[in-house]
Image (cartoon, helix red, strand yellow):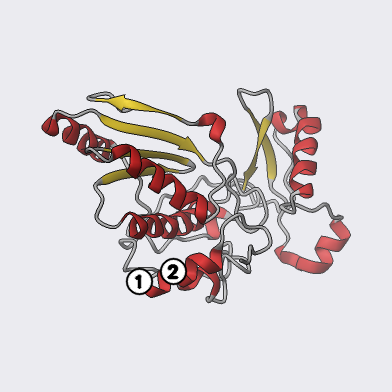
Amino acid sequence: MVVDSGQPFLLRLLSQWLEVFEDPDVACLVNATDSFATGVNVGVGDPLPRTPQVFPPKVKHWKLDGTEFNPIADNYMSGQLSAKELEEKFREEEALGRMEPSKMSVLRARYGGRLRVAAMAAISKPDGGVRPLHDATHSVMVNHAIKYRDQLQCPGPAEVAAVVREAVETREAVFCVSADIRVVWINKVGTFGVSSAPYWWSKLFALIGRFVGHVMQTAAYWHLVYVDDLHGAFTGPLKFELLWVWLLAFEVIGTPFGYHKFKGGTTGMKLF
């Protein structure tokens, strides 16, 4: 089995499986010019793709804040105060092959006038670490150039209410499990703050979700995904067996779960 560089997922295995089921978006895994196996485009210069069989069209775009263009931006105060923690984080990412240090002269030679250095901010995490945030909107204006053609959709109150309603109507406790995917990264770099990152993540994890759906076949279950949080709900006499099949399907394809964040249990009305 082949694991492409910079990816935890078995993209080629996933591609072969979904090709059998004629998935409408399977080409972006390994066969497209910009694929998850080789690296996807940010959406600056080259437009983001359109996948009408999966996503509705994007018809409304937010107007981003006006800003004075500056291709080399200074870090925010939180980034300056957390410089040591950020460097430690970057070294960890470098060891995993997701980032690499370089010099301005080298980067200018490689990218010319397209080079942008975004301002960094740091968000404190409960464990004492920091989450790097790239501001690709202000100064560098990268996000201004990225236009979605697909409308992303996330589970909301209506979907959660449907899971609750099933529990009420069947008068049966639904077994729920919530999980957290340990890492979220695209194209080997931390992309928090670049507006195309959630688009590519939605495409990738939608493909994985449909793979899991094929494995589950006609079983009755729900799974809701919001960014890197995954919630599964199972009902009926085989709910515990279905839970293990569901979890195994995600594992088989390489999903990097953070098992220390797992939680679950049976519940009637309250799901979270």
Most extreme residue toward the left, as rendered?
169
Q: Is residue 41 above or below residue 70?
A: below
Task: Find disc 1 in the rendering and name its residue.
Answer: 21
In which quadrant of the rendered image does the C terminus lie?
A: top left
**For residue 103, above or below residue 89:** below
Number of labels in the image equals: 2
| Above or below for 185 versus 15 | above
Label 1: few (<14), some (14–19) or many (≥20) C-alpha neighbours in 10 Å: few
Residue type at mark 1 is Phe
In the rendered image, which quarter is residue 124 located in? top right
Query: Does 60 sit above or below residue 247?
Result: below
Secondary structure of residue under mark 1: loop
Is residue 272 visible in the rendered structure shown here?
no
Rendered location of residue 208, percent (x, y): 44, 57
Which residue is painted at 22% across and 38% down in the image?
Answer: 236
Residue at 60% x, 67% y: name it: 37
Q: Give the numbered dot on residue 17.
A: 2
Residue type at mark 2: give it: Trp
Observer able to see residue 264: yes
Q: Is residue 247 left or right of residue 95?
A: left
> Picture coordinates of residue 190 (x, y %)?
65, 48
For mark 2, does the 10 Å Cα neighbourhood hold few (<14), some (14 to 19), or many (20 or more) residues? some
Residue 162 screen position, x and y as percent: 20, 38
Residue 56 position in % (x across, y down): 30, 61
Per the image, label 2 sits on a secondary structure element best described as: helix
The quadrant the N terminus occupies is bottom right
Badge 2 vs badge 1, beta-carbon distance below 8 Å = yes
* Left or right of 58 on screen, residue 133: right
